[in-house]
Amino acid sequence: MTTNKEEIVGNYEIVEGKVKTRREVLMMGALAAGGIMSVAGAQADVVKQVITTPGEIKEKDFSSLLTKKMEGLSTNQIEQHLKLYKGYVAKTKEIDTMLQASDLLTQPPAANATYAPLRELLVEQSFALNGVVYHELYFGNLGGSGGEPTGDLKSAIEAKYGSIAKFMDYLKAAGKSMRGWVIIGWNSRDGMIHTYGLDMHNMWSPANVVPIMVLDVYEHAYMIDYGINRAAYLDSFLKNLDWNVCAKRFAAVTKHPSGWDSTS
Ligand SMILES: [Fe+2]
């Protein structure tokens, strides 16, 4: 490879004074081999290298939840829910791969705000990725012993809602109001705890917010155990909520507002 790389910044590289994506740099190197590799061969090689680079989304192991005997949440309910999560991981990988390859096939990709393959990939990218992240945060704050938050998190909730009892009532009401998720998040804009509701993984997810507690209220989260009785599910969720995990997320986000890694 004969390109003159001057600096590497994340996924970008400065080459001869110009910002290039890593893919562009790889392509330059492949084409610089001249005569050894066809353009099509170079593209295939680049795609292969890009999709195997670090950062590829990986499935997290939540199998410990299956042996915890959580009160009110059956093993079958959790097992089926985890299968759904794995499906989101697979689809996120599939979409990422297609997006990484798309601009190699057509320069530039076809673009249209009513329909274009790129548009559809971009729309479903946020749905699939948020489906992964919110489920990781949800399963990550399950498996605890319920009760109430303590320490700084308790103080922050009380500052916003007046008391833990009022907060719990508000949380349950939010849980009955939404069709997808309820997020207790730290808003870095005002430095306070807030409750947000989402009807889909990628619908109404607020900016500047890092999730601290995530509650799944999609029917698939409780139908096996409770049918349409969401109130009973909410009670069981709160009995198994791990406030220690939420406290760790809160401590991390207040020190470093870029947020808590959902895979942690
Ligand atoms: Fe779910």
Image (spheres, rainbow, N blue to C red):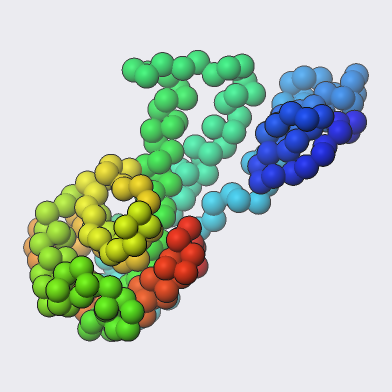
Q: Quadrant of the N terminus?
A: top right
Dividing the picture into quadrants, the one containing residue 91 is top left
Front residue (pair 236, 110): 110
Residue 43 position, x and y percent, is 72, 26
Dividing the picture into quadrants, the one containing residue 211 is bottom left
Ligand 1 picture quarter: bottom left
* Count of number-bearing discs: 0
Dividing the picture into quadrants, the one containing residue 104 is top right
Q: Is residue 112 above or below residue 43?
A: above
For the point 34% across and 62% down, the residue is 191
Residue 120 position, x and y percent, is 40, 27
Residue 152 as seen in the image, left or right of residue 106: left
Q: Is residue 247 above or below residue 231?
A: below
For the point 37% across and 42% down, the residue is 127
Residue 44 position, x and y percent, is 71, 29
Front residue (pair 105, 254): 254
Q: Is residue 145 above or below residue 187?
A: below
Residue 217 as seen in the image, left or right of residue 24: left
Front residue (pair 145, 17): 17
Residue 134 seen by the camera: no
Residue 40 seen by the camera: yes
Residue 99 as seen in the image, left or right of residue 71: right
Residue 2 position, x and y percent, is 90, 31
For the point 33% across and 79% down, the residue is 152
For the point 82% across and 39% down, the residue is 6
